[in-house]
Amino acid sequence: MGRLFGTDGVRGRANVDLTPELALAVAVAAAHTLAETDRSRPPLAVVGRDTRASGEMLEAAVVAGLTSAGANVVRVGVLPTPAVAFLTAEAKADLGVMLSASHNPMPDNGIKLFAAGGHKLPDEIEARIEAAVEANATTAWDRPVGAGVGRVHDLLDGADHYVQHLTGTVPHRLDGITVVVDCANGAASEVAPVAYREAGAEVHAIYAEPDGLNINDDCGSNHLDQLREAVVRLGADLGIAHDGDADRCVAVTAAGDEVDGDQVMAILALAMRDAGTLTEDTLVATVMSNLGLRLAMSAQGIRLVETKVGDRYVLEELRAAGLALGGEQSGHIVMPAHATTGDGVLTGLHLMARMAQTGRSLAELASVVTKLPQVLINVPVGDRTVGAAAPAVRAEVERAEAELGDTGRVLLRPSGTEPLVRVMVEAATEATAREVAERIADRVRAASPAG
């Protein structure tokens, strides 16, 4: 069987790749794997989802799988991924399950798993769950009967608990700040506007009317045009965009210019350093972060530690080293003092708190980072491993690295969730970066043509 888990859980086209049968099997395997340490009580699982119509179907399958394995289930309904992680920890549950494909289009869906404490799973635990899925497919497993079958309860005030937690972390009130928030017609549609208002901001919400089909549809963190227009038209101080499950936060200035995750990290790193809460004056970022972030942090006396792509690798480094801030260019920002995973609404609150505290505009704060021109090409391929590792591709990468020298860099990696190879090039000029990236992308296409 192929590898189930990608960069962020199990993901695929709902009812084609990610079927109810697979969702049930993953739920059973997760219950057996994550709840095996304590058999003195029934395992407890927290289950949430984003606004995708297929989430209703997959939620039913996951709940069936968990209860058939003897786990009791608390359904929390539509909530952001970080809210499910938070409630998993609050309930002292053995595991949490979030049904979402994050920023992906509506036909996709996914299963994100959390261990006790609301933490994402390390690779070795995912491998054990995958092995259990395979084993259960060929060998009957012992099913509980009678009182051993799990029960299901609904938590009706999970959003209130989560918002109260978020607003309790804000270091400075947001009074006087006007923000437009793009909720991507996703899981942030209810909680983000409420949290920002309760913290003191004047809030204009857009794309906050989910119907099950419109999540991420030309809106959210991957589609900023409508947010830019609304910010400028309304004269707002900034705009904030979340993705479908609200674990991302990117922003736009009052003039409509994008402020990406690298710039947000820099702003928060300086705020935390000034407050004495940036442990060891260290920031954790992935290899995808712009060279400009590295240069900016070095100039400010802040050390940057790199990880593989994926917020769970950032989280692993933060936990292992006891550090206080990390994230990704895409807008996954992790603040372990307040969350066990990337939290877009939490990030938005702290970003605006820095603006309110300093009296500086978002554009001024973001100017600490001068980004090197960066070109990213997502190349559709038939086989992402072949497309990334073919000798002709590697030779082209080596040639490009020799040309760029210290003035840029090349990063080539297969997507963890889609049939793509990602080609990223940074260079002194955008023209150079694009020319080099296109050359490499052409080699990738030739090595593994898309079907």
Image: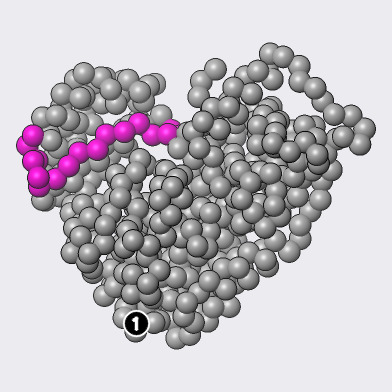
Residue positioned 82% across, 46% down in the render: 152
Q: Which colour scheme is used?
A: one colour
- Which residue lies most toward the top here? 138
Quadrant (top left/top right/bottom left/bottom right) for the N terminus: top right
Q: In which quarter of the image is residue 190?
A: bottom right
**Picture layout, residue 278 above or below residue 275:** above
Residue positioned 28% across, 39% down in the render: 377
**Picture layout, residue 112 above or below residue 145:** below
- Which residue lies most toward the right here? 146
Q: Where is residue 231 in the image (x, y as percent from the top left)?
A: 39, 72
Which element type, helix, strand or loop, lies under badge 1?
A: helix
299 or 130: nearer the viewer: 299
Q: Give the range drawn in magenta.
A: 402-418
Q: Where is residue 134 in the image (x, y as percent from the top left)?
A: 62, 19
Whether residue 432 is visible to the viewer of this picture, yes or no, is: yes
The amino acid at mark 1 is Thr
**Picture layout, residue 168 above or below residue 404:** below
Left or right: 288 in relation to 180:
left
Quadrant (top left/top right/bottom left/bottom right) for the C terminus: top left
Q: Where is residue 223 in the image (x, y as percent from the top left)?
A: 40, 55
317 or 40: nearer the viewer: 40
**Picture layout, residue 181 above or below residue 96:** below
Q: Position of residue 236 (x, y in %)?
A: 40, 78
65 or 188: nearer the viewer: 65
Left or right: 162 in relation to 428:
right
Give the labeled residue for mark 1.
358
The magenta stretch spans residue 321: no
Residue positioned 15% across, 23% down in the render: 395
Residue positioned 36% across, 25% down in the render: 384
Left or right: 385 in relation to 196:
left
The magenta stretch spans residue 404: yes
